[in-house]
Image: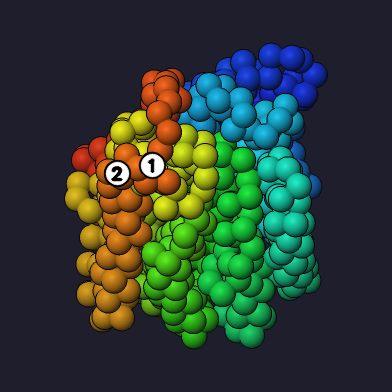
Amino acid sequence: MTDVLVLLVLLPLAGAVVAALVPARAVVGLVVAVAQLALGVVAAAAVLRDGPVLGELGGWAQPLGIGLRLDGPGAAVGLLSGVVVLAVAAHAAAVPAATGGPGYWPLVLVTVAGLQTVLVADDWFTTYVALELLTVGAVGLVALGGRRAYEPAVRYLCVAVLGSFAYLVAVALVYARTGPLALHDGAAAMPPGAATATVLGLVVVGLGLKSALFPLHAWLPAAHAAAPAAVSPLLSALVVKGSLVVLLRVWTGLGGDAHLGTLVGLLGGLAVLVGGVAAVRQERLKRLVAYSTVAQVGYVVLLVPLVTPSLLDPTDAAAADVARLAWQGGMLILLAHGLAKAAAFLAAGTLVQVAGGDRVADLRGIAARAPVVVMTFGVAGVALAGLPPSLAFVGKWQLLTAAVAGGAWWAVLVLLVGGLLTAAAVARVVATALRRPDDDEDDAPAAGAPVPRRVALPALTLAVLAIGAGVGSAWLADLTLVGTGVGT
């Protein structure tokens, strides 16, 4: 299985080189996307069956060589990446104008390679390099939005560099204290104390910047709004997930910290509420969807204070049960958000193109011309709000159960109010699209050709998956626990 781990990284890198040299860039991107999904399925099945997949590049063991390790969360996010990248690539091939230019395909594949490296890296420094590769690809994709995207792209780059610096300082502290940098051995090498708390604080700040954790999120709405229509889904569904996976791995590997865990949980709760309110108030469609991403990141980090007691006292059986539920719930929300938010951004990009403007008011009556796209946005909104039988509903139910069992009633309130805010934001868009304007109104949509099926189908597929994946999702919940040590 080591070859599969290597292929997960090398295949998109090789594809990026080929896509930069040949004219048929879209064909290369689609072929690589299909192969990447197949590799993701194989890797996820192996992890679920046999546990974490381990390997070393060139046969050199750590610390001399580069170790590889694919655990359950990495395999689950890798599977998500395969599905989302294939759907977005299909949309981009159908709508070349949504890509921002020929540089789109090499940059997408570089971004995928960075994410896959993050998922399989087994040491702190390789993870740092992978995060930088992921950032370079993502910033380049944002810049494809043209002149109006240059400022958000530079802002994103500056924020990402600051985040990388904080993470690199944490790496230096770990190296000075322990020598070996294997991620999964961190708890044994770094005993609890001031040094561990400092490392965790730096990692939370650094990766919080990269994943837009409140209040470090200011760069995200502008970057997502300015990016091309086929870029925003990747940024929201996948790029921020890489940083979140590393944050959660480091937190569990180092054993957590009670006070810092409470702070992270509170920031997550504020992210849900502030992001939800901001989404409801937005007048621009893509910014509305972008602020929803801020809220969804908050949902995921709510698991941190619920998991931490079990990390601090592994003998507490009740805390272990809460930790398992919270971890599964948070990870399922992460995966559901990836599917639903990619669908929402693809649908939003198509609606903006059809309406000729990105204001929510511009969508009045647009359902008559793009009924499938409006329906897709609504279905994605149902998944984001966590309504049954969606995958997000299963995740929220797990997280709610954990919060009640752990006595975190504030988290219960956040989860309930956050779902209502998301539903309100989505309902506002759908209601506007369904509202029939009078024929003499200035904002009545001009007649035009319906949206082609090949354009609407990728987003609709993702939205349906976000709903349908909630049925029979026990295997996926089990997969997210493999190799984490949570609740054991």
Kind of residue at badge 1: Ala
- Image spot of residue 227 (x, y percent): 63, 46
User: For the point 21% across and 40% down, which residue is it?
Assistant: 471
Quarter location, residue 396: bottom left
Point out the image quarter for the N terminus: top right
User: For the point 40% across and 28% down, which residue is it?
Assistant: 447
Point out the image quarter for the C terminus: bottom left
Above or below for 442 versus 106: below
- Image spot of residue 445 (x, y percent): 40, 38
- Image spot of residue 324 (x, y percent): 32, 61
Residue 438's tag is: 2
Is residue 87 visible to the viewer in this orientation of the structure?
Answer: yes
User: For the point 43% across and 33% down, which residue is it?
Assistant: 446
Taking the image as shown, residue 186 lies to the left or right of residue 52, namely: right
Kind of residue at badge 2: Asp
Above or below for 136 versus 218: above
- Image spot of residue 212 (x, y percent): 57, 63
Above or below for 374 versus 161: above
Q: Which residue is mark 1?
A: 444
Q: How many marks?
A: 2
User: For the point 42% across and 67% down, which residue is it?
Assistant: 281
Taking the image as shown, residue 154 lies to the left or right of residue 333, namely: right
Whether residues under marks 2 and 1 lie with C-beta atoms below 8 angstroms apart, the answer is: yes
Is residue 190 visible to the viewer in this orientation of the structure?
Answer: no
**Dot 1 crowding, Cα within 10 Å, few <14, some 14–19, many 20+:** some
Quarter location, residue 190: bottom right
